[in-house]
Image (tube, rainbow, N blue to C red):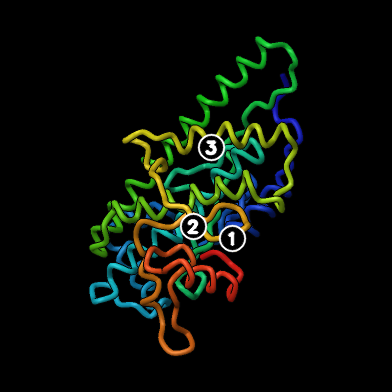
Amino acid sequence: MVRYGDYDHAAMSAALEQAFVTRVRRAEELSSFPFCAKDLLCEGTREAILREQAVQQGLELGGSGSLAVGTLFAKRYSVLVMAVISAFSMYDALLHIEEDSVHIKLNGTGGMWYETRLERLVETDTGSQVTLEQEYWFRREKEARLLRDRLQLHLQRMFQAVAKATGASDKVMSSLVAHNVQQLAASMIHDPDICWTNQRLALIEHDMHIWLEQRKENMFGGTFQRFEHGKWQRAPLLIRRYCCLAYQIGDGHHAHSYCNSCPKLDSESRLRQWINKGTLT
C-alpha cells in the first residue's frame, strides 16, 4: 500500500484544462478569475453574473430566454463536475469543491472556465495481499461516496439559487448534469482514445458504480435512453431527458441547432448531425 503513487500535478491540470476547461491551481497561487461559485448564492452578484451570461448568449434574463439561461448554466456547470470526477478516477485526486474555492470566468460566449485547488490525494494500492486489497477497495468506496454526496449538496445549493433567478427547473438542471456524468462514464470506459491500464480501468469501473448508483437520493443515477442505430459503432451515446434549450441561442449563421444528444432529434437526424459536426454537445 503506497500513497500518491504516480501523481503529476502539471499533467493532471493540463488534461483537465484541455478536456473540461478546469485548471487546478497550486496551493500558493491566487486565482485571477473575477468571481467564485459563492457569488452565485448572493442575490445581487448572482443577478449580475447571470445577466452578463445571458447577454453573451443572446438571451434575456427575466424575458423569454430566462429559462434557457438557467438550463444552460447547469449544462455548462456540469463541465466542472466532470473535471472533479475525472480527477478522482484518473488521478486519485480530490479537488476543492467549496463555493469559495471554485473560481469562475465567463468566456465571452456564455460558457465558463473554472479554477480550483487540490484538496488532497487518495491512496493507491500496490499490495498483493487479499486483506490489503479488501481494505483498499473499502476505503476507496468510502472516499467516492463522500465526494459524490458533497458534490450533490454543492449542486443543489447552486441550482436552487439559479432556479430562483431564472425560473428554470432545478429538476431539469440536475438531469442535464446527470446525463453528462453518465456520458462521461461511458466514454471513460469504452473510448479507445483514453489511455488507461487494466488497473486504472478497474478503478474507473469501481468508481462509476458508486457515482451512477440507482438510488432515489443519488442525483447522478437516473436512467437515459441509448442511441441505437445500425451505423453507430462508437462508444454509447446517451439521450437527454430534457432539451437544454441551447437552440434559443443566436440567430442566422450564429444560431445553435439541437445538440447531438437532444431528445428532440429523431434517429436519422441525430446520426446525420453527428457525422456533420463530429462532436458531442
Q: Using a 10 Å C-alpha cutoff, classify the residue at mark 3 as few (fewer than 14 neighbours), some (14 to 19) or many (20 or more).
A: many
> Within the image, what quadrant is residue 169 found in?
bottom left
Label 3 residue SS: helix
Badge 2 amino acid: Phe
Q: Using a 10 Å C-alpha cutoff, classify the residue at mark 2 as few (fewer than 14 neighbours), some (14 to 19) or many (20 or more).
A: some
Q: Is residue 80 left or right of residue 14?
A: left
> Within the image, what quadrant is residue 19 found in?
bottom right
First in residue order: circle 1 vs circle 2: 2
Badge 1 amino acid: Trp
Q: Where residue 63 sits in the image (x, y, percent)? A: 23, 76
Badge 3 amino acid: Met
Q: Nearer the viewer, mark 2 or mark 3?
A: 2
Which residue corresponds to the image point at 56% horizontal and 49% vertical from the top-left? 83
Which residue corresponds to the image point at 35% horizontal and 69% vertical from the top-left? 245
User: In the image shown, does 68 or 196 lie closer to the viewer?
Assistant: 196
Q: Where residue 21 sits in the image (x, y, percent)? A: 58, 60
Q: Residue pushed farthest front?
A: 230
> Within the image, what quadrant is residue 46 found in?
bottom left
Residue 232 disc label:
1
First in residue order: circle 3 vs circle 1: 3
Up-down: is 22 above or below 155? Answer: below
Q: Is residue 241 visible?
A: yes
Q: Where residue 176 sits in the image (x, y, percent)? A: 39, 55
**Count of number-bearing discs:** 3
Q: Where residue 133 sits in the image (x, y, percent)? A: 66, 17
Residue marked by disc 2: 227
Alpha carbon separation for disc pair 2 and 3: 20 Å
Alpha carbon separation for disc pair 3 and 1: 24 Å
Disc 1 to disc 2: CB gap under 8 Å: yes
Q: Is residue 45 visible?
A: no
Residue marked by disc 3: 208
